[in-house]
Amino acid sequence: MEIAVVVLSFSVLVSLCLVAFLYSRNLALQKVVSNMKSEVEKTKKDQEELVSIDVGDKAIIPNYGLTHTDTKEDFHVTYEVEVVEVSTKKVKVRAVSFTSNDKFARDPKNKQSIIHFLQDKWVDRKSIELLVDDQMRRDRKLKQILG
């Protein structure tokens, strides 16, 4: 009977030590996770600043699907656009140029009408890909430094 009490007392003591060890380790891991979250938020904010869309920025709209009304011919073009206005969910763009592998779009007589189609149109922010060049990086750095 006394041996059972000693064994049970020893097992409770070992369990308490193990719980204390795991608790301290849990606290350390929570600190690491907290630090990582703050670093990720800072990095995410920096990236959003780098790729925020401003008026005058250049972008592309890849694989934009069009249909010619007379021939009912479907074709796709990749527009190069300039940002005219910006809202929270949409961007007003002005087409500058386009590229395509489709026969209809490559015909020179159709070029102006295809470009004219996307003049001053609102498109989703998610559908455009911002072109980041040296000038854009420089402007972003100046904004970051100045405030």
Image: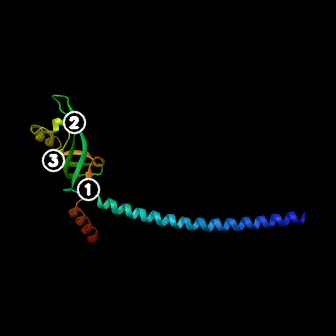
Which residue is depicted at the point 16% across and 35% down? 104
Comparing 147 with 16, the one in front is 16
Colour mapping: rainbow
Secondary structure found at label 3: strand
Secondary structure found at label 2: strand
Gap in Å between the C-alphas at discs 1 and 3? 19 Å
Left or right relative to 56: residue 44: right
Task: Give how far across and how far down residue 143 sits, in percent.
Answer: 25, 67
Q: Which residue is denoted by mark 1 in the rendering?
A: 53
Q: Do the residues labelled 1 and 3 touch (CB within 8 Å)?
A: no
Which quarter of the picture shows residue 72? Answer: top left
Furthest residue to the right? Answer: 1
**First of labels 1, 3 by sequence position:** 1
Count residues near mark 2 (Cα–Cα under 10 Å), then give few for <14, some for 14-19, many for 20+.
Answer: some
* Mark 2 vs mark 1: in front: 2
Gap in Å between the C-alphas at discs 2 and 1? 28 Å
Which residue is depicted at the point 85% across and 65% down? 5
Q: Which residue is denoted by mark 2 in the rendering?
A: 75
Which residue is depicted at the point 49% across and 65% down? 34
Task: Give how far across and how far down residue 51 sits, in percent.
Answer: 29, 58
Left or right relative to 117: residue 15: right
Which residue is depicted at the point 18% across and 44% down? 99
Which quarter of the picture shows residue 45? Answer: bottom left
Q: Which residue is denoted by mark 3 in the rendering?
A: 97
Q: Which amino acid does label 1 sit on?
A: Ile
Furthest residue to the top? Answer: 71
Q: Which amino acid does label 2 sit on?
A: Phe
**First of labels 2, 1 by sequence position:** 1
